[in-house]
Image (spheres, rainbow, N blue to C red):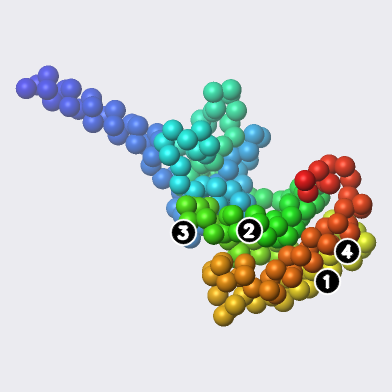
């Protein structure tokens, strides 16, 4: 009986140690997104809209595209890297979680890719109408938020031009498309009725104008930036 109790005690101690090491919350969380990202330099940042969508997707256990999620800040990948997604409540209290900042190159690349997504009707049909899609990024609402909110374009490009992120010539190439996009109201004001939006003549016209605008400012882009539009 004594040996049994000793063995039971050891098992309980091991389970408790594993829980404390890998699962016990290290900080309180409220309404923030469940995960954050550890950078290679050890800093921790909030996730982008696309990353949040990626982590909300449903993956099969054997799916190689499944995200790598650390349970401990110190955990490393097989090649010795510290970077990776981690639950917010597993971040040590002493480490600050910072807001991601886009440098000019990242902003420009994201801007070009968002315009590409917003001017490709076939791509929108394929992703927005996919009944098996579990990534919330592939939706009218998220496309619009990623463009206007994430890129901070609600002021009609005023700040972006002042910061040198976009040239006046580039803006003029897409200004009419940008205006119509900002003024667009979905049928019956239902931003989640993708079928109605994709069949809406106003939306189709905006997409087509966007395609023309892309062609207008392509010559102003460098070789790498033009390659993003392929």
Which residue occupies 34% across, 36% down? 19
Q: Nearer the viewer, mark 3 or mark 4?
A: 4
Q: Which residue is mark 4?
A: 173
Q: Could you say which is closer to the camera, residue 3 or residue 53? A: 53
Dot 3 or dot 1, earlier in sequence: 3
136 or 29: nearer the viewer: 136
Rendering coords of residue 55 (x, y %): 51, 47
C-alpha separation, residue under disc 3 versus residue under disc 1: 41 Å
Task: Find the distance from the CA under tag 2 to the CA under tag 1.
Answer: 21 Å
Between disc 2 and disc 4, the foreground one is 2
Q: Earlier in the sequence, mark 2 or mark 3?
A: 3
Classed neighbour count for the residue bearing mark 2: other residues with Cα under 10 Å, few (<14), some (14–19), many (≥20)? some
Q: Quadrant of the N terminus?
A: top left
Name the residue furthest left: 1
Residue found at the far bottom of this picture: 188
Task: Kindly identify which numbered label has been placed on residue 176.
Answer: 1
Label 4 neighbourhood size at 10 Å, few (<14), some (14-19), many (20+)? some
| Residues tagged 1 and 4 counted as in contact (Cβ below 8 A) | no
Residue 88 visible in this rendered orientation of the protein: no
Asked if 68 appears above or below 172 in the picture, the reply is above
Q: Residue at x 9, y 21 (%)?
A: 2
Q: CA distance from mark 2 to mark 4?
A: 23 Å
Q: Give me the residue at 88% from left, 50% from top.
A: 221
SS at mark 4 in the image: helix
Q: Which residue is mark 2?
A: 124
């Amino acid at each position: 009986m004594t040996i049994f109790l000793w063995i039971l005690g050891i098992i309980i101690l091991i389970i408790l140690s594993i829980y404390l090491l890998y699962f016990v919350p290290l900080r309180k969380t409220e309404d923030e997104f469940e995960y954050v990202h550890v950078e290679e330099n050890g800093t921790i940042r909030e996730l982008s809209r696309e990353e949040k969508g990626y982590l909300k997707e449903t993956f099969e256990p054997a799916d190689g595209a499944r995200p790598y999620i650390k349970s401990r800040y110190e955990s490393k990948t097989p090649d010795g890297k510290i970077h990776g997604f981690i639950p917010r409540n597993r971040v040590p209290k002493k480490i600050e979680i910072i807001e991601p900042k886009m440098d000019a190159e990242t902003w420009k690349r994201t801007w070009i890719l968002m315009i590409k997504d917003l001017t490709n009707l076939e791509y929108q049909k394929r992703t927005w109408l996919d009944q098996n899609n579990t990534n919330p990024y592939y939706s009218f609402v998220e496309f619009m938020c990623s463009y206007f909110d994430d890129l901070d374009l609600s002021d009609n490009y005023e700040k972006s031009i002042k910061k040198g992120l976009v040239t006046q010539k580039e803006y003029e190439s897409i200004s009419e498309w940008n205006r119509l996009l900002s003024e667009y109201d979905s049928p019956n004001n239902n931003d989640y009725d993708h079928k109605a939006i994709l069949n809406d003549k106003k939306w189709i016209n905006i997409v087509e104008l966007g395609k023309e605008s892309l062609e207008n400012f392509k010559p102003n882009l460098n070789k790498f930036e033009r390659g993003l539009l392929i």
